[in-house]
Image: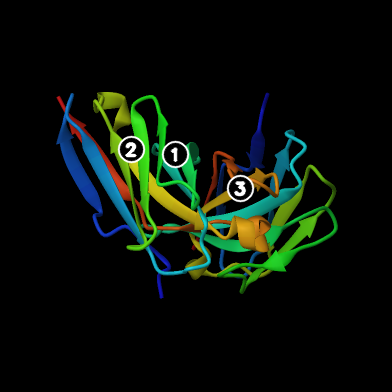
Amino acid sequence: NAGVTQTPKFQVLKTGQSMTLQCAQDMNHNSMYWYRQDPGMGLRLIYYSASEGTTDKGEVPNGYNVSRLNKREFSLRLESAAPSQTSVYFCASSERQPTEAFFGQGTRLTVV
Amino acid sequence: DQQVKQNSPSLSVQEGRISILNCDYTNSMFDYFLWYKKYPAEGPTFLISISSIKDKNEDGRFTVFLNKSAKHLSLHIVPSQPGDSAVYFCAASAVYSGGGADGLTFGKGTHLIIQP
């Protein structure tokens, strides 16, 4: 049982480049999330999708877009990467109730 | 303003003793609380949770206590083991008020170090 799978695990981008982080879950969860974690900070919510076909902004959505491709997949896109987006990105999924979320291994992104 | 606060960035405890990690919250809408454990280069893993209708939840060596009036929760680990060395995140959600699918609000984490 893979749980939540994120690709890639590591990425280096130049400022202004674009990329898409992929996330897939095999637990038939309705809700999916993208978080970022910066040094000394907790995880901050970027975007979430409460159910297939819906997406909403979280705490720090600027500079990102998301797509809930189907129930399994939720991608995060950086259209024009900036050094401030250097971070570790975590995808998570959960049922609506309760909200125990399962996390992927993370994507370590560096923007130079 | 931080809605979930973990005021101790790190905590060092001797193996076999009790570890107590603390968390405070400010949002009165929060009604479901969780603790996550995170090792380096891995995603957070769920440890234990508690809803606001309870004041204690126990799972093996881990116990979470909730004091709603003080907006405070704590995680007790007894006895502490070397494998418990990790970063612990407190998280909160407004599940029963309909905000459960909106994601979790996390504290900044406490790095627990278990010394032999």
How many angstroms separate mark 2 from mark 1 (CA)?
11 Å
Graded by Cα atoms within 10 Å as few (under 14), some (14 to 19) or many (20 or more), the crowding at tag 3 reads: many
Q: Quadrant of residue B112?
A: top left
Tell whether label 3 touches label 1 (CB within 8 Å): no
> How is the rendered protein coloured?
rainbow
Q: Which residue is mark 1?
A: B41
Image coordinates of residue A30 in percent, x first then y, are 76, 47
In the displayed structure, B46 sits above or below B99; it is: above
Element assignment for label 2: strand
Sequence-first tag of 2 and 1: 1
| Same chain? Circles 1 and 3 | no
How many angstroms separate mark 2 from mark 3 (CA)?
22 Å
Q: Can residue A40 be seen in this snapshot?
A: no
How many angstroms separate mark 1 from mark 3 (CA)?
23 Å
In the displayed structure, B34 sits above or below B79; it is: below
Image coordinates of residue A81 in percent, x first then y, are 60, 67
Image coordinates of residue B67 in percent, x first then y, are 35, 55
Element assignment for label 1: loop
Image quarter hosting the N terminus of chain B:
bottom left
Q: Amino acid at mark 1?
A: Ala
Q: Which residue is mark 2?
A: B86
Nearest to the eye among marks 1 and 3: give it. 3
Residue A91 falls left or right of residue B71: right
Q: Amino acid at mark 2?
A: Ala
Using the image, name the chain to which the residue with label 2 belongs. B
Q: Which residue is mark 3?
A: A99
Q: Amino acid at mark 3?
A: Thr
Residues B84 and A106: in front is B84
| Same chain? Circles 2 and 1 | yes
